[in-house]
Image (tube, grey):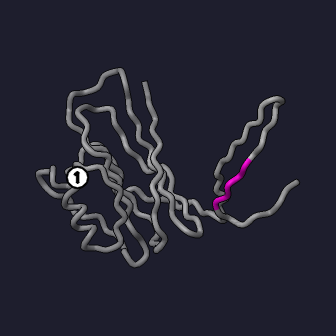
């Protein structure tokens, strides 16, 4: 028996019997409506940022972009020119992972999907364990630009462990 439903979040309850015991489980599922994969354009990605806090930032204007770029490049002797962004048609997504005391940590925006009610940014955080790691301070980050939207942005983090 199947039924067509509108996109949304639904609670499904299942009653399972196995004499003499009865089990009851409930789960929540989200049925997504139409979605579109956006193609983020990398502005810069790496492990050395002057922005030392963990943060997820959506930038929609030049003033905020200049502040974030200035913080991000504050660890450099010479500040590079700020990358051009047309804030009439684009916005910037910046992910900073925070401070680590060795190499082996990476952060990458691996997917950006637009749904009717939100944009979901998937961030993959890779931790290399074992092998040759350097005793050096690192600050992994990824900054991209995508088409401008007024939808709320939600961040989903995946962690990958590599040996």
Which residue is found at the position 48% from the left and 49% from the top? 110
Position of the N terminus, as image quadrant, is: bottom right
Can you identify the residue that label 1 sits on?
A: 51
Q: Which residue is drawn at 44% across and 48% down?
A: 123
In the visual, does 16 lie left or right of 82?
A: right
Q: Does 3 sit above or below residue 76? A: below
The stretch of residues the image draws in magenta is: 9-13
- Crowd tier of the residue under label 1, counting other residues whose Cα lies within 10 Å: few below 14, some 14–19, many 20 or above: many
Residue lying at 67% horizontally and 58% vertically, measured from the top left: 10
The quarter of the picture where the C terminus appears is: top left
Residue 31, how many percent across, how many down?
A: 67, 58
Q: Does the magenta stretch include residue 77?
A: no
Task: Residue 101 in the image: state x and y as whole percent.
Answer: 23, 33
User: Outermost residue, top direction?
Assistant: 131
**With respect to residue 20, does 41 lie above or below?**
below
Q: Is residue 113 left or right of residue 75?
A: right
Q: Residue at x 47, y 56 (%)?
A: 121
Occupied quadrant, residue 153: bottom left
Q: Quadrant of residue 33?
A: bottom right
Q: Choose between 163 and 14: the one closer to the eye.
A: 14
Residue 156 place in picture, x, y as percent = 47, 51
- Secondary structure predominantly adopted by residues drawn in magenta: strand
Q: Which of 55 and 137 is in front in this view?
A: 55
Nearer to me, 156 or 46: 156
Count of all numbered marks drawn on residues in the image: 1
Identity of the residue furthest to the left in this view = 77
> x%, y% of residue 162?
44, 28
Report helix, strand or loop for mark 1.
loop
Task: Looking at this view, name the residue that lies furthest to the right.
Answer: 1
**Residue 131, image quadrant:** top left
**Is 27 displayed left or right of 95 in the figure?**
right
């Amino acid at each position: 028996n199947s039924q067509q439903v509108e996109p949304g979040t639904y609670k499904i309850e299942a009653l399972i019997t196995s004499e003499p015991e009865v089990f009851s489980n409930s789960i929540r599922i989200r049925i997504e409506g139409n979605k579109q994969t956006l193609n983020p354009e990398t502005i810069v990605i790496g492990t050395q940022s002057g922005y030392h806090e963990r943060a997820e930032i959506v930038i929609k204007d030049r003033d905020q972009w200049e502040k974030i770029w200035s913080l991000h490049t504050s660890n450099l002797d010479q500040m590079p020119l700020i990358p051009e962004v047309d804030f009439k048609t684009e916005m910037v997504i910046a992910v900073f992972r925070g401070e680590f005391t060795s190499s082996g940590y990476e952060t990458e925006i691996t997917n950006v999907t637009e749904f009717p009610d939100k944009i979901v940014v998937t961030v993959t955080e890779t931790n290399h364990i074992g092998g040759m790691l350097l005793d050096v301070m690192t600050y992994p980050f990824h900054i991209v630009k995508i088409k401008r939207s007024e939808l709320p942005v939600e961040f989903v983090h995946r962690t990958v462990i590599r040996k």
